Amino acid sequence: MAFRTVDEAFVRALQAVVTTGDVWVGQEERERYGHDETEDLVHPPEVVVRATSTAEVSAVVQLCARHQVPVTPIGGRTGLSGGALAVHGGVGLALDRMDRILEIDERNLQVRVQPGVITQVLQDAVAERGLYYPPDPSSRGSCTIGGNLAENAGGPRAVKYGVTRDHVLNLEVVLPNGEVIRTGANTLKNATGYDLTHLMVGSEGTLGIITEAVLKLLPLPRHTMLMLVPFPDAVKACEAVSAVFRAGVVPSAMEFMERDAIVWTMRFTEGLPAQLSTGPAAYLLIEVDGNETDVLMRSCEIILGVVEAHGAGEVLFAESASEKDALWRLRRSVPVSVKAHSVYKEEDTVVPRFELPRLLQGVKDIGARYGFTSVCYGHAGDGNLHVNIIKGDLSEEYWEHELPVAIREIFTLCVSLGGTLSGEHGIGLVQRSYMDIAFTPAQLQVMRAIKHAFDPLGIMNPGKVLPDM
């Protein structure tokens, strides 16, 4: 599809409708909004617009539709699938200035927010009122609610509380023609018409731009208990995961980290317990939460019995709030530490949790056959394994042409185990060529029909999610 190039007249038209926001054409600003955390990819938009209101977003999108200029929504730029990269140029529509928490409804346990609100800022604000917003990606200190909605983000506590989609009641959305709609109602039950709310969550900005969200809240759990469990065998650590659930315990978090992830990350993390060692092949970080300490202690006893039966070493309990914070910093710093070590490709694989040991072993076997090293970690309780393929001294020829064959084999393995291509990072730019592994031609055609119904001009975040025909 042919798009119009941005020219001076179009920029002037943008400046006329963006009266309180910013319109930037300088190289520095365009490059700043031209990358996220996906490998080392950079795709600057031709012009950056930082809108401040739904009305400005609507006016910009109407202008883009009228002139057939592509528009790419941009949030906190922490994504790992290239979803916010303006691969066709056009307008990069940044929502970071739309960052207000509009209302905290304590009576109905709801919150109404703009898309530019930082996830941790929201969590802290509701926690001050004894409330809880569970979705917490590792980048929660910098990622935004809008990006979380676009990618259907998860995080460590999705294992108990669900992913972003499970906490959304209603959305305000600017459609690709500039029209503004509400997708649902501020009610816990809604069996009225098609579920546009859940269709929008996870659509990666290809169907519309979310400008406001009504989210569900929970009472804040009063207590947490956290343990770090070492294993001499990484596959055994994965086998212990489903066994914990089968024993009747649902942790609030259950994270897997193999040795290299720990080794690299300890360099960036202060205040770690002295007992922490780089000797074990893998660790599980397991948290339980609730309001009754005796119930949590019983859950911990059950977990201890399960992990010991799977060969775990001496378990480290976080005794204080500072120790808990240090262990969570360790886990949340893993992605940054891996990226600091080398250029890498991260595959966001996910399988039913019982199949996690077969997935991990399969990834290592594929790496041995194709000659690459991987560092694996992730949300083990969900069966969500982040496979980080390290570039190191691999050649550009291998990286660009041979490695995709190996990645295709990894995804084929995931699907054969009952899983799929992405658990929480989305498809975006870098995974769309693999969509045929997870979906039949008929399924992909349904998705294309939905895309066309919303966006017949194809201007909304083009080049993402769906593979080329």
Image: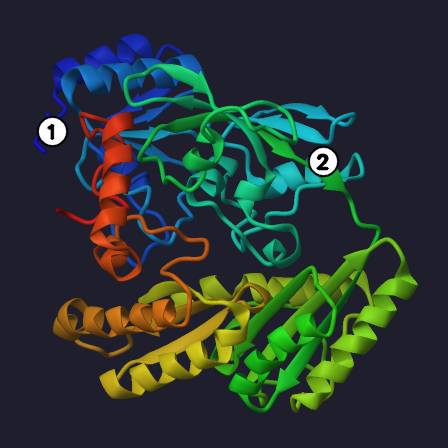
Left or right position of 452 against 279: left
Q: Which mark is residue 3?
A: 1
Residue 16 marker: none
Q: Quarter of the image containing the N terminus?
A: top left
Q: Quadrant of residue 63?
A: top left
Residue 404's place in the image compared with 393, above or below, is above
Query: How far is the residue under mark 1 from the one under mark 2?
Result: 43 Å
Which circle's residue, 1 or 2, is located before the other in the chain? 1
Residue found 29% across the figure and 23% down from its top: 176
Q: Position of residue 272 (x, y in %)?
A: 68, 72
Q: Secondary structure at mark 1?
A: loop
Q: Nearer the viewer, residue 33 or 383?
A: 383
* Label 1 CA crowd tier, 10 Å (few <14, some 14–19, many 20+): some
Q: Residue at x 37, y 79 (%)?
A: 363
Q: Is residue 239 left or right of residue 460?
A: right
The residue drawn where x is 30% and y is 17% is 60
Q: Is disc 2 placed on a helix, strand or loop? A: helix
> Vertically, is 189 above or below 44?
above
Could you say which is closer to the camera, residue 238 or residue 242? Answer: 242
Are there few (<14), some (14-19), or many (20+) residues within 10 Å of tag 2?
Answer: many
Which residue lies at the image location 43% right of the left edge and 45% below the top edge? 151
Which mark, residue 126? 2
List x then y, in percent, for residue 69.
17, 25
Give, as a three-letter code, the residue at label 2. Val
Amino acid bearing label 1: Phe
